[in-house]
Image (spheres, rainbow, N blue to C red):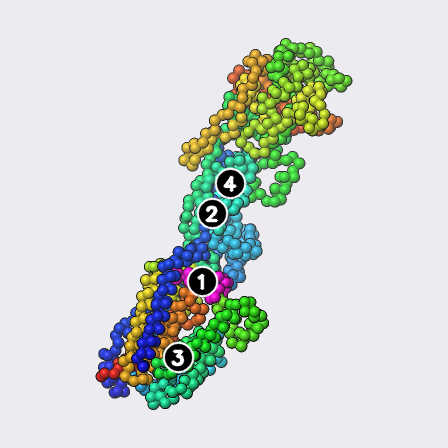
Amino acid sequence: MSEFLSNLRLLRRMNWLMLAVICALIAVGVLFIFSATQTREGAMTQLYQMQIKWAVAGLACYLVTTVMDYRKLRDVAWWFYVMAAILLVAVLFFGTRIYGARRWLMFLGVGVQPSELGKLAVIMAGASLLSPPAEKFARLPSMGWLFLLAGIPMLLVMKEPDLGSALVYVPVTLAMLYVAGARSRPLVLLVLSGVVLVTVVLAAVALPEKLGVTPERQDRFFRALRLSDYQRDRIEVFLQPGKDPMGAGWNKRQSEIAVGSGGLAGKGFLKGTQNILGFLPRTVAPTDFIFSVIAEETGFAGSVVVLGLYGILVVCGLYAAMVARDKLGRVLCVGIVTMIFTHVFVNMAMTIGLVPIVGIPLPLVSYGGTFMFVTLFALGLIQSVYVRRSGI
Amino acid sequence: MELRRLRVVLFLMMGGLFLLGGSLFSLQVERRHEFEQSLHRQSMRRVRLPATRGRIFDRNDVCLADNQPCYNLAFYLEEIRAPGRWQHTVDEVNARLKKLTGIIGRRPDISEQDIWLHIRKRLPLPLVAWRQLDPAALARLAESTMDMGGVDIYIEPVRRYPRNGLAGHLMGYVGRAEFTDDDLEGFQYYLSEMEGKAGLERVFNNVMAGAAGGRLVRINASGLKHAESRDKEPQPGEDLVLALDSRIQALAEEALRDVPGAVVVLDPSNGDVLALASSPTFNPNQFVPFLSAAMWDAQNKDPARPLVNRAVAEVYPPGSVFKPVTALAALNSGRCGPDYTHDCPGYFMIGAHPLKCWNPNGHGRVNMRKALEQSCNAYFAAVGLQCGYEAIEEMARQVGLGKKTGIDIDNEAAGLVPGQAWKKKMWKDDWRPGDTCNVSIGQGALTVTPIQMAVVAAALANGGTVYRPRLVLGLRDRGGHFTTNYSPVAVRTLAVSPSMMTTVREGMHDVVMAPTGTGARARIAGVELAGKTGTAEFGAKEERRKHGWMLLFGPFDQPRYAVAMVVDEAVSGGSTVAPRLHDMMDALFNGDGKRADG
């Protein structure tokens, strides 16, 4: 405890710019959650207050994490990993079913998404695996260990099903391996084979006739891939923008209209008609599609500001990795930054139609307690690495 | 190596963020208009707003057609919308309908099916559940303590004819407008609008309808109304000012009160239609807001044909009221002067066939004036043969027979002036002397409309000017300023000398004023009138059915009124029509507090 108190002075060495950016993003999130729920009734109008509570709790956790020495992770990472894995199994059996997927566990009235904890667990366990003293594993065989490490929670998350969250594990694992010094050739091969697989899936959805594939064989292929019907629909509407505008294509189309009609300067705070009139589906406006609301109401100018804030966050995170005093801190920072970047990129890209719709939130901005808390904890780890940077 | 690889990661991530920035630029700046349009298309709807319909006034500013508010009860689904499936909202509406039925006291005008139809087709508009609430129901609604959220009075203008059936045939009626694609260009929704379906309502529909406006409704993703704004104000229609005098119209309708027929009263000095009545008539208020199918059937299948405007749309053989035209033709031909005489034994032989005169004892030797007074068939048959049919046909056309007068009312009939060519075509036969004799006394194939005969009466009254009947004096805007004036139109002046006209007019004078005149029963105190009766046979000969006719004008020296009247089933013009015109003219000139209610 006394050690903890003596570490408090480390807070002065914190990256203040990063904290400012975090607070700014949280503020943006609260404002636009308020905007996105302005036409709702009852408890839904209180979402922004919930978000503030989560943010305060998260920031407290952030500060505590900053003060704590990240090197202790080596002791707890595996316990954390095992707990997350148990929760991921538990959610498959006891999770609350929402829209056909079990992603939530209820603890004392608070909903927790184990898949978010899983990401963190993989990053922490992976960082310890890839740094001394475990580093001896990190030669070629350790790649296999890491894939096993990341693969277990990834498959469990896919099972929920939550393909979007599951896919986040891929870039995170690759980036950690890359920075930890894995040989490039297998990594490149891996990435290439991933690209080929995605291409094959897309081609199978889009061009069955042209490739001479019968619908039955197409079905069998998708069953083998465990791709559900709604996932197929999402890929199809992504490839064919005009398809099914009232059904599967609705969210994508309405999100694009919201963003596009925002123009250069936006329609003004609380004045986004796509949101007010309910064209942007009300259930996802404060969560996965919060960026559509922001882009509609603040226009290109506002979108670029938000984009810039994330840019600063990425730079700060990677800077912490560069100045980290050891490999554990470096790989940890890279894993966390990659996780956040992947969320930001995929979330924004889906709201403007660059990638198919996958339900993953925008860090610090989308409504959602677990992810807010996890994100702030993770950013706290980055600060913890930063305040203990080399050269003291 | 680790630092280099970190830089690669940083570089890749920055690249990703720039890619996002570029895409956002493309979407929000370059393609902005495309998305604004999509937004507009999916969330804005234009509703066509009807303009206030123009009114109809008579020449003394008596209102004959007006608009009045109709109080409907409407549901506003955007306020009633229950969460979840639409069935919940329909249940909610049904629950209110049930409660309101108790208050209003009659069943709603809509079924559950109508509610679904409304949700599918006209969601952002009010759903009218009860039309035309009476004051008692409105009062009960105002006093009721029921929660009226989403329910409100919805006012719609409806057509009202304050004088009820007066000039019903001229007014015509309105019905629900049927829109063409052009009318609805740029509109997604329209409200029920009225459109003239018959009579002046139809003929002047365009000027009275005005120009529709528009309202922009912003709808939400469910299709319900979110907000609305005026887009274009409707331009109110123009009022019609008629030449009609509702006092005279009432008298004319009174003259027809119990018989089918028609009366037209013109001002001989300009052709103004002072009255135009047809019997049996109908009350155009029955057609408001729309006529039920059952009533439409009843009106249409009624053997008395109340929807037919006999004054313009029905053709009759004119019978003896044509004789003044024959007389003018004969005089004008130069082959028989006013002193031409014929000895009537009670018939006229055409070859071997006798043409009966109405007086079996014969009229003896008569000249033209006397022959008109007595309406001697034999005389006019002889005159017809004397002057030749071409002269008669020519004169008939000059006075405007065989052709529409051009009065501004729908369904006008042209009538028929037969001739050589016509007979060849229709009967494959030559024109024979018998045909000439028949037409000379207004029979044969000759047919006319009452409005045509009124024009003839007016021409005889004013000394030879054939006017196009003027029904509408002009159009007035809402501020009371005339925007259009219709001047009297003299179609032609008859090519006859004043002395010829005098001969015919004197004969017609005697018809009414001589003690033995066939139209003596039309005589009234204090005013000299002139006229001509007629009794035209129609249908199979053995049925002996007759139309009764009379033309009348007066005062004789400076005529103010020219009248033509026909009664479908009559004993004779002199006995059936003349007394009715007596009553009308007496009230017109001498006043009659009881009947002339104008």
One can see residue B572 in this view? no
Q: Name the residue under label 4.
A: B159
Q: In which quarter of the image is residue A65?
A: bottom left
Give amino acid for label 4: Arg
- Specify whether disc 1 shares its chain with disc 4: no
Give amino acid for label 2: Arg
Q: Mark 2 points at which residue?
A: B48
- Specify whether disc 1 shares its chain with disc 3: yes
For the residue carrying disc 4, how many other residues have a C-alpha within 10 Å: few (<14), some (14-19), or many (20+)?
Answer: many
Which quarter of the figure is the N terminus of chain B placed in?
bottom left
**Residue A100 magenta-highlighted:** no
In which chain is the residue bearing label 3?
Answer: A
Residue A250 point in image, percent of width and height: 47, 63
Q: Residue A174 carries which label?
A: 3
For the residue carrying disc 1, how many other residues have a C-alpha within 10 Å: few (<14), some (14-19), or many (20+)?
Answer: many
Q: Which residue sits at x=31%, y=86%?
A: A71
Kindly state the secondary structure of the residue where label 4 is placed.
Answer: strand
